[in-house]
Amino acid sequence: MRRKSIQFADQKQEFSKRPSKIGRRSLSRSISQSSTDSYSSAASYTDSSDDETSPRDKQQKNSKGNGDFCIKNIKQADFGRREIEIAEQEMPALMALRKRAQGEKPLAGAKVVGCTHITAQTAVLMETLSALGAQCRWAACNIYSTQNEVAAALAEGGFSVFAWKGESEDDFWWCIDRCVNVEGWQPNMILDDGGDLTHWIYKKYPNMFKKIKGIVEESVTGVHRLYQLSKAGKLCVPAMNVNDSVTKQKFDNLYCCRESILDGLKRTTDVMFGGKQVVVCGYGEVGKGCCAALKAMGSIVYVTEIDPICALQACMDGFRLVKLNEVIRQVDIVITCTGNKNVVVREHLDRMKNGCIVCNMGHSNTEIDVASLRTPELTWERVRSQVDHVIWPDGKRIVLLAEGRLLNLSCSTVPTFVLSITATTQALALIELYNAPEGRYKQDVYLLPKKMDEYVASLHLPTFDAHLTELTDEQAKYLGLNKNGPFKPNYYR
Amino acid sequence: MRRKSIQFADQKQEFSKRPSKIGRRSLSRSISQSSTDSYSSAASYTDSSDDETSPRDKQQKNSKGNGDFCIKNIKQADFGRREIEIAEQEMPALMALRKRAQGEKPLAGAKVVGCTHITAQTAVLMETLSALGAQCRWAACNIYSTQNEVAAALAEGGFSVFAWKGESEDDFWWCIDRCVNVEGWQPNMILDDGGDLTHWIYKKYPNMFKKIKGIVEESVTGVHRLYQLSKAGKLCVPAMNVNDSVTKQKFDNLYCCRESILDGLKRTTDVMFGGKQVVVCGYGEVGKGCCAALKAMGSIVYVTEIDPICALQACMDGFRLVKLNEVIRQVDIVITCTGNKNVVVREHLDRMKNGCIVCNMGHSNTEIDVASLRTPELTWERVRSQVDHVIWPDGKRIVLLAEGRLLNLSCSTVPTFVLSITATTQALALIELYNAPEGRYKQDVYLLPKKMDEYVASLHLPTFDAHLTELTDEQAKYLGLNKNGPFKPNYYR
Amino acid sequence: MRRKSIQFADQKQEFSKRPSKIGRRSLSRSISQSSTDSYSSAASYTDSSDDETSPRDKQQKNSKGNGDFCIKNIKQADFGRREIEIAEQEMPALMALRKRAQGEKPLAGAKVVGCTHITAQTAVLMETLSALGAQCRWAACNIYSTQNEVAAALAEGGFSVFAWKGESEDDFWWCIDRCVNVEGWQPNMILDDGGDLTHWIYKKYPNMFKKIKGIVEESVTGVHRLYQLSKAGKLCVPAMNVNDSVTKQKFDNLYCCRESILDGLKRTTDVMFGGKQVVVCGYGEVGKGCCAALKAMGSIVYVTEIDPICALQACMDGFRLVKLNEVIRQVDIVITCTGNKNVVVREHLDRMKNGCIVCNMGHSNTEIDVASLRTPELTWERVRSQVDHVIWPDGKRIVLLAEGRLLNLSCSTVPTFVLSITATTQALALIELYNAPEGRYKQDVYLLPKKMDEYVASLHLPTFDAHLTELTDEQAKYLGLNKNGPFKPNYYR
Amino acid sequence: MRRKSIQFADQKQEFSKRPSKIGRRSLSRSISQSSTDSYSSAASYTDSSDDETSPRDKQQKNSKGNGDFCIKNIKQADFGRREIEIAEQEMPALMALRKRAQGEKPLAGAKVVGCTHITAQTAVLMETLSALGAQCRWAACNIYSTQNEVAAALAEGGFSVFAWKGESEDDFWWCIDRCVNVEGWQPNMILDDGGDLTHWIYKKYPNMFKKIKGIVEESVTGVHRLYQLSKAGKLCVPAMNVNDSVTKQKFDNLYCCRESILDGLKRTTDVMFGGKQVVVCGYGEVGKGCCAALKAMGSIVYVTEIDPICALQACMDGFRLVKLNEVIRQVDIVITCTGNKNVVVREHLDRMKNGCIVCNMGHSNTEIDVASLRTPELTWERVRSQVDHVIWPDGKRIVLLAEGRLLNLSCSTVPTFVLSITATTQALALIELYNAPEGRYKQDVYLLPKKMDEYVASLHLPTFDAHLTELTDEQAKYLGLNKNGPFKPNYYR
């Protein structure tokens, strides 16, 4: 996912800046912590017993004697299997894909090397790819986000998984290397999230690209890197940009944030929304989702924007368009969703009123200038996980969430249904690239064909018991459309 | 405007089908009737006195002795001037344009021939073009929609206007010809709405295109014709597609329909929305607007869709996605917004319950198969202007609005503010084409540059006392944007 | 209805202040004008032919030779009958009452004298009372609101109706007297709206009360008069206060105003709601309805309140609570719903911005100090029916709607469904009082028993195809309720 | 609070049914767990070290040597103090009360014995009472809900507190007795939540009532008991019913549930709301809040009701009114808010679809017949705290939340702001009863005077920066109101 990978990028930057101990402390702020916390406090306890030994130093073996993996604790496999089963219930499209495509095995012969978050949802994807005929080797794209119990279940099920929660940077690249560099097995497809796997192969094993049919990439960062490669003429295989598919954009941003802004604020602060004054910086899809939700809950919402078109939309949707300075003294909550940097700076923070909550729903941790708060006259007090009180000399407290990192990843969970859409898109992109006739795709970055976007959407409609209308022949002719789509121009959102 | 011009196309088809008397009767259902009704019952009365004489047979002369125009009644000029002044208050962007661009007269030397609806809003546009340096000659693009009093005010003000309410088809082309075919004056810019003016020049005066710098076209139909010309290699000047600019699309469709669906239904039927079951066919921008409004008023709304992506959006927005047949027996209101044909057919109409209201918000009168209701066993009863009861043998009544034509044009008014956006876009498109350096535009159809779209939006923000935020240099650099825009990719909606 | 009767009171005050000619001119601004306009422009034309002769001077006779009525024009009976049939479709509860109660004729022997608005909806009520066994004589409670064609249909159907649109004050009382003072017939039930009929009998025929079993009164004013009579010990029969029944209050105020505020503003000004800044004075049921509707349409809404509890509700519902002075310079629309006087005074009007729309949804024409605008330096310009521009010396225009009278009565229509609830309540109140055993009701003012309120509601559920759940015996016992209700305490709203 | 106390009643019933060990296990499902969890995982760890010793067996002494209290661990006082300070920020009305009333000490001489939840919010109340002059002794009204660290802070501050998390039933009564039965100190005011304290005094120390000036009771159960005493002629002092004050009702039910339904569902299940089909049983204030929130988040909501008036409100608010059986097979979430018993029974549960979430927002754990699920063929699986999967033989899983207990208490937190309203009302009720002149209150149950309700509301307006309008003298006279209120009749909600 777009935002997770950027989160990752941020965290990696911290590698160099912080001594390893502090790095370890910051584990507690990672995305996985928030999600596993709620699922599996039991498991966490078991973890603590063997916390000290690195998985790389342990003997790894599953119940069938297979040892081609590296995870935290194979004993958690049963617990992980249950998590996977729960996820399956909310990922009907992948399950449908398993059924529909099973006979033909469209990925027969595919050797997929993957680097993504290792979660129950990813497990459902991997087992789907396997059911479609693919062989998979997998590493984590984030050092904190691995659900150890899920990795265990995958390993027990025969997958070569190399991932655990709390990897060091060295571990991180070691795991990726173990996925790629294996005797007698060479990948022909890449599924990446953030571009690190792709980067590693470019750097260490460039010859592998001769056999690779394509790359499927889902993150903003990874896609950005691919476009740069393409511009520089260095992209040697076709790549599929999953990040910009309409279903992903709309769901991840508008619909998902509409729910997660409320969830994130409640879990961290228990704030009552009714009557609160809120300023939302940025009225793109994320901002639209946040504003709609808070307005519906009885908050009074102000919006800031730089783009006149989005500004006009905010007006028509019933929000006062202001400059941040105009309302900064009066608001109870400040939310950034601009994708920009230094949107909230020390000067704003100095002027906020006592108790003001500050958080970020945008694309990275740059939006709030948190560094400006690390000055001697201000006291930081951690009052809960992900919640800091920053205290001014006069006693004023600002409530800073997730240290300015992404609220929805740090402090709420992403609905499985949304992940299902992305995972299905990834699977279809793999199938498309793997089976495309010679010449359909050049060494360039592609969007998934509109028709496949529509197919992903259609696979998710049964979840809502939604019944699509079919065009009659006469109507299709009148509109100049194929009855099976695509129905809209590519730019339609 | 997109939908008005199609309305026109439909009505023209009726020319051939109906005897002229019935044609004349149907005047009362035209768009202009609904808008002038509310403004100017007084004026209508005066009209009736000289109803019989054609304007073409009258002597035309304004108070300064000028007679180069053809309108209904110059005596209505004062009344028309008041209407124009009222419109000016809601068109701040054009007024701002007059001020900002007046010094430089960017249209000095421009000779604009126009063919649009002749309304108070158009008058504000024409007087703006004039203030910017242009000379204008104008005809109506619709035989019913001219506000006679506005035409009078324009003629009194020195504009060569050829238009009145209730033209015959012959009158229609005669007026266009009078605009174009005048000694000692040759147009160098075309502003068209529907493509009829462009068509006439192509057909009658193809040589004129040698001096014409470009065409600005705002309707779906007109744009469609231009693309066809372009494909056929017959487009001989650059053309600006105003219809597809984002501000126009969003405002005309989403925001405008959100209001006009309620207004149109109330004015025609006084129906209470609370608790009503409604099915909306189509969940594009128009459907989204209708659904949001009705849901907010307490209706229970069902949606039909053919496109899985829009279908999924409907689900996430809280609407049951159904096939029309599933709910047709139970709904109180049926609204079509598909842009398709025969969405509601006789079979559906037969199954609707007594009192069901049927109307169309889509792009033309094809969505409801009204023709299928003109059978001997059904009785039609006109109960109000724009409202027919169609009565089944068993006494069941269906309430058909505007005979299946566009509800929002026939039975409600379009807010001036929305028209302001379109008119400003037209003015900017004219300026752009007129001043573009040689070679910027080829003989093709162009969208207004994104930056101009944003400029149009920015001119409308003061209406809402909306304050735009400006990027700092650092932020602009971070985002890789120019501080003055454009801020979003072209496809952003 | 509550607000209509107060409207009447206001208008009566004008009798004394204005010469009759101006009184007549103001006809065009009365409530009836707006409702009949939309229904029956045809009929109005016919009207004009015999405008000059007073109905009192005409010979009155229906097709069966009966002449015991006084109306405008018996020839309009067919048209009126159609209007009544249309109303019947939206008044299912009365139709159900006809069916259910027809066998037993619960009003057999009842002689009801009524004084209400004479509209299609009242006709459905009267014909229901008749079907239940009652004899009826009827006058209008408002000099402007009579639908002449409906009166004609009633007269043709054998009802003794005395009412026409545009009565003088003398006509008004003459009609009431004709209802009451008739040889060989003495009323035993009163159905009043405003208290004028009751007042007349008190004043002229006090002995009649010996035979009268009760009064059913629906207006605020009438109810107020009854409570005063009761306090003074002068109420000589039981009276039913229909106005304060919960169904009436909620529907008339919250739900009805939620729709009519939009309708009234659109019909008069065509204003676009999106992005508009609105201040709503008063957050009772009417204010709640207005605010909810405008917020849903994209307006930014401010609220003023005097009551801290309602103020806190406004806050929790997402509205900024302000004093009028704080926002008066910036708002586009001002709406009063306080039930108070001089809420908007000249000082406010002086500070409003150009183009500001001012209207009243509250209980009478006192909320806006319109009189303060009738000073020499201000120019009034009537721009449409019900719409005045008041123009300041500097050119600023305020758009005043309905001269400060009730917007929803003057400029929109009241949904038949809402009137159905009131009419059903009136019918049930009549049945209850007429059949109550000796001693159940004393000479006092009563609210309809809760159970009957619930019965009225239940009769309206089929309209929505709504399915009520029934308590099991066990559940009823657990809750200590009768399975058939009443289910809530009397004060539940 | 109303619902907490009922929760308590439920839990007490479990005393007799379960062996004490299981009782102890169920600690983890109590209300306090969810709230302290999020605040104070650190503290919980410390707890576990001395888990085994009962507080009754420990030596109790604070830093000043005072030992007249019984709590878990005085060392947590600092942590508790911080929690209290955080709460103070959200309870501005009590802080204002401290300031305004401090000079006069309206509770000087008052000896208040209290029995409520011991939370940070209660601590703010107790310290306010103390600041107003009262002496306080306090016990917990719930065996699970005590925040041990807050009890420690209170004890350290000199309050005689007898409460800890996880009391046995014997502990519970022992604590209450220690509050009341103390040499040289006799209470003259009772503040109760659930009626247990009142009950204990009635049973053990009836003579105490001679000195007691009044009882303030806030729970449904407690109020019910008082009315029964009153009916039976056994109430020997005046009592104030805080539960039914309008501010409490509206906030606790409508506004609070609007937020907590979303929060409770997210924290337990991470369910995505968009597109989900939900049935809400009961459309009282709680149901209204739940429905509004879910509709706003994009769910499709069905409602069941027994009361036709509430049913009609549901219709007008845009919800399909159904019987549970009609939709039980298709819904994704079932929510009960009826206050009734056996609303969802085994038959319904058998028919639900796989994955259906079932939870209760109503007044007790009777609404869902959870007992019917404890049969051999069904497997229960605890998947998270408060979340059970109940598994049918065919593999179907129902997701049961909080074992049918109150979702909002078990699985979400109650905003401090809402508790502030209740606590302020309690404080004012104590002041009123304590200072009322002889004879104002008899031995009966009273509602707080409307004016005080309004005062409570007004104290909370500054939180929203809300500015109340004041009546002019002229307006007050016109309305017949005192300028300082009360403004509405008592029944206004």
Image: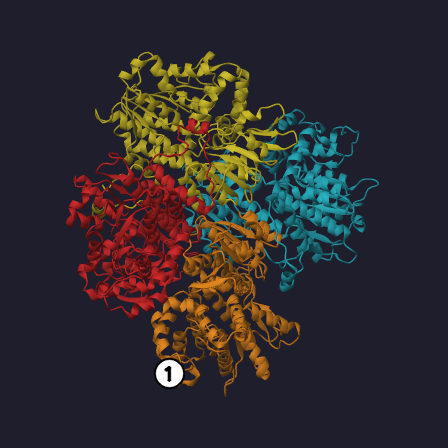
Chain colours: A cyan, B orange, C red, D yellow
Provide residue B50's location: percent of width, then percent of height. Answer: 37, 80
Amino acid on which disc 1 is placed: Asn
**Observer-nearest of C333 and A22:** C333
Provide residue C103's location: percent of width, then percent of height. Answer: 37, 43
Q: Quick check: can you spot residue D173?
A: yes
| Residue D23 appears left or right of B124 | right
Provide residue C46's location: percent of width, then percent of height. Answer: 32, 68
Total marks shown come to: 1
Residue at 43% in and 44% down: C461
Q: Quick check: can you spot residue A352?
A: no
**Observer-nearest of C135 and D325:** C135
**Observer-nearest of C170 and B45:** C170
Chain bearing mark 1: B
| Residue D26 appears left or right of A392 | right
Q: Mark 1 points at which residue?
A: B62
**Observer-nearest of C4 and B298:** C4
Provide residue D251's location: percent of width, then percent of height. Answer: 39, 36
